[in-house]
Image: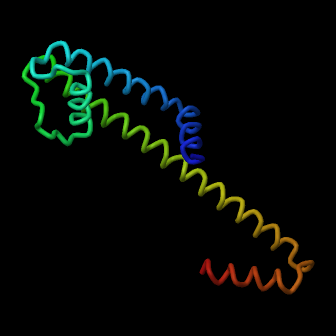
Amino acid sequence: MKKLRILSAVLKKTKADKIVLGFVIFLLVSALIILLVEPDITRYGDALWYCYAVFSTIGFGDIVATAFITKVLSVLITVYALFAIAVVTGVVVSFYNSCVEQQFKETKSAFLDKLQRLPQLSKEELEEIAEKAKKWK
């Protein structure tokens, strides 16, 4: 649950949440249009199922588009889904990289601080620095 809140905060901070929200709205409206124009789809749930099969690029084949508008919407849903997934993935990876970089800077800063106070350090702290130096080799 905490990770989901962090992801939500990151998406809001980078404005990527608007892309995700736009995609969800586009998907729901597309399902409604598909329900209205596609003769084989008689329930909104089936239209949403078709949209899922399209945007996940799985294409189960249980529902096939016959109307021209549905075919156009299918292409748009697929392109929008790929774009939204790419943006969200990029934002998450970028956030993760910045967290790792921040941790590295903090570790490096603490290590350099200890090096500057080398004569004042205890024997245990000196051994700890020696062990870290061996690991970084």
Q: Residue at x 84, y 71 (%)?
A: 116
- Rendered location of residue 43, percent (x, y): 21, 21
- Rendered location of residue 7, percent (x, y): 54, 42
Q: Nearer the viewer, residue 38 or 19?
A: 38
Q: Is residue 33 above or below residue 103?
A: above
Q: Nearer the viewer, residue 13 or 32?
A: 32
Q: Residue at x 62, y 80 (%)?
A: 135
Q: Residue furthest right?
A: 120
Instruction: Please state, as top left, top right, bottom left or bottom right, where the C terminus lies in the image.
Output: bottom right
Q: Is residue 39 above or below residue 16?
A: above
Q: Residue furthest left?
A: 66
Q: Is residue 127 above or below residue 79?
A: below
- Rendered location of residue 113, percent (x, y): 82, 67
Q: Is residue 99 above or below residue 78?
A: below
- Rendered location of residue 120, percent (x, y): 92, 78
The colour scheme used to paint the residues is: rainbow
Task: Give the side of residue 64 with respect to residue 82, left or right.
Answer: left
Q: Residue furthest top?
A: 36
Q: Nearer the viewer, residue 13 or 55?
A: 55
Q: Residue at x 86, y 77 (%)?
A: 118
The quarter holding residue 121 reads: bottom right
Q: Residue at x 68, y 59 (%)?
A: 105
- The mark total stands at 0
